[in-house]
Image: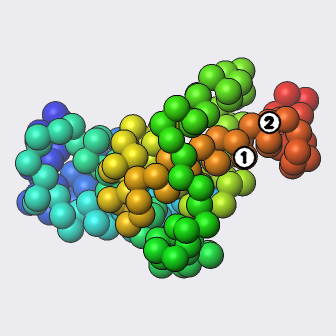
Amino acid sequence: MTESELIQKCKEKHRGAQQELFKRYAPDMLGICLRYTQHREEAKDVMHDGFVKVFTRIWSFREESSLKTWLSHIMVNTAIDHIKKHNRKYNYVRLDDEEHLLEVQEEDTIDNTDIPSQISSEGALHLMQQLPDKYRIALNLYAVDGFTHRQIAEQLGVKEGTSKSLVARARGMMIELLNGKNLKHRQYERSKTG
């Protein structure tokens, strides 16, 4: 079944097509949810909620982008909504908190090359899951999902400078974790190689 046929059948609420769509895209969507959450069970919950949204909103998909891009967007938004809903000290959307974040100029941000390329994708995921929510979300939106600081600011309800600061600080935290300032990471990497 082609992607267009699959989409059309899902719009007609065909159960088999919905199962096929889930089967095709669940692994990639779970990967996205894992990047935004702190553990696998939470990521599965977010992915489930995301697919519920997909199947209730599939009629609005106009095929202007790929289905995978559309699904990814829904999963990212669902993950952010989940974190906000569970309010794990996710307070950076309040304007008074922005005063405590240093505005970072574009030239002051840390370059991607500061994070060693030899780290495994599993190791990077583990590191990212250790970051506080606000930093993990901003770094994911910017470095992985390709959002601009302006888009991140709009998505999160913060100033553009705050987005830059969050991303720079998240990268700094990742570098600290890589430099062994967190024993959990080193133990995790050793367990993967040994």
In the rendered image, residue 69, in percent from the top left (x then y), is placed at 28, 41
| Residue placed under numbered mark 1 in the picture | 173
Question: Looking at this view, is 37 or 15 the one in front?
Answer: 37
Give amino acid for label 2.
Leu
Foreground mark, 2 or 1, reads 1
Give amino acid for label 1.
Met
In the image, residue 183 sits, relative to residue 119, either above or below, namely below
Q: Is residue 100 left or right of residue 63?
A: right
Mark 1 Cα within 10 Å, few/some/many (few <14, many 20+)? some
In the rendered image, residue 88, in percent from the top left (x then y), is placed at 61, 75
How far apart are the two marked residues, 2 and 1, measured between alpha carbons? 9 Å
In the image, residue 186 sits, relative to residue 92, either above or below, namely above
> Which quadrant of the figure contains the C terminus?
top right
Mark 2 Cα within 10 Å, few/some/many (few <14, many 20+)? some
In the image, residue 35 sits, relative to residue 95, either above or below, namely above
Q: Earlier in the sequence, mark 2 or mark 1?
A: 1
Q: Is residue 165 left or right of residue 53?
A: right
Q: Splitting the image into 4 quarters, where does residue 43 fall?
A: bottom right
Q: Which mark is residue 15?
A: none
| Residue placed under numbered mark 2 in the picture | 178
Q: Confirm whether residue 176 shows in the render.
A: yes
Q: Splitting the image into 4 quarters, where does residue 153 fall?
A: bottom left
Q: Splitting the image into 4 quarters, where does residue 51 fall?
A: bottom left
Q: Is residue 114 left or right of residue 34?
A: right
Instruction: Identify the residue shown where x is 46% and y is 42%.
Output: 142
- Its colouring scheme is rainbow
Q: Confirm whether residue 48 shows in the render.
A: no
Instruction: Identify the residue shown where x is 72% and y is 46%.
Output: 173
Instruction: Identify the residue shown where x is 57% and y is 37%.
Output: 109
Q: Are marks 2 and 1 in contact (CB under 8 Å)?
A: no
